[in-house]
Image (cartoon, grey):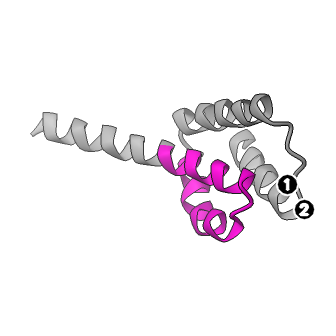
Amino acid sequence: DIVDRNGNVLANSARRLEVVRNCITYIFDNKMLEAKKLMPAVLRALKGRAARVCLTQELNLHVLQNRAVLDDQQFDYVVRMMNCTLQ
């Protein structure tokens, strides 16, 4: 029925946002193996508007909390997500 379908859509959307949040946290915590595992799902999620907004909000939070200096791989992952968001 329609309620069940809407519930599934909302659950899927929430999962996609959680994947984006987790990946960004892993990147800033330098847990790159975990981030690498999530990247394909993150790049798929970023096709949706809500995930793109989530990405910008999460990056902003990390910048405000700690002015982290990213290594090459961390920077590469952030840039890949931003490029995907801008396409």
Q: Residue at x 32, y 43 (%)?
A: 11
Disc 2 residue type (three-letter): Asp
Residue count near mark 2 (Cα–Cα under 10 Å), binned few <14, some 14–19, many ≥20 = few
Q: Which residue is mark 1?
A: 75
The image quadrant that residue 86 belongs to is top right
Residue 57 position, x and y percent, is: 65, 30
Disc 1 residue type (three-letter): Phe
Q: Is residue 75 left or right of residue 25?
A: right
Residue 64 position, x and y percent, is: 78, 28
Q: Residue at x 14, y 35 (%)?
A: 2
Q: Exactly how many numbered labels are in the figure?
A: 2
Do the residues bearing badges 1 and 2 touch, measured as CB atoms within 8 Å? yes
Tell me the quarter of the image containing the N terminus.
Answer: top left
Q: Which residue is mark 2?
A: 72
The image quadrant that residue 4 belongs to is top left
Q: Nearer the viewer, residue 13 or 32?
A: 32
SS type, badge 1: helix
The image quadrant that residue 61 belongs to is top right
Secondary structure character of the magenta stretch overall: helix
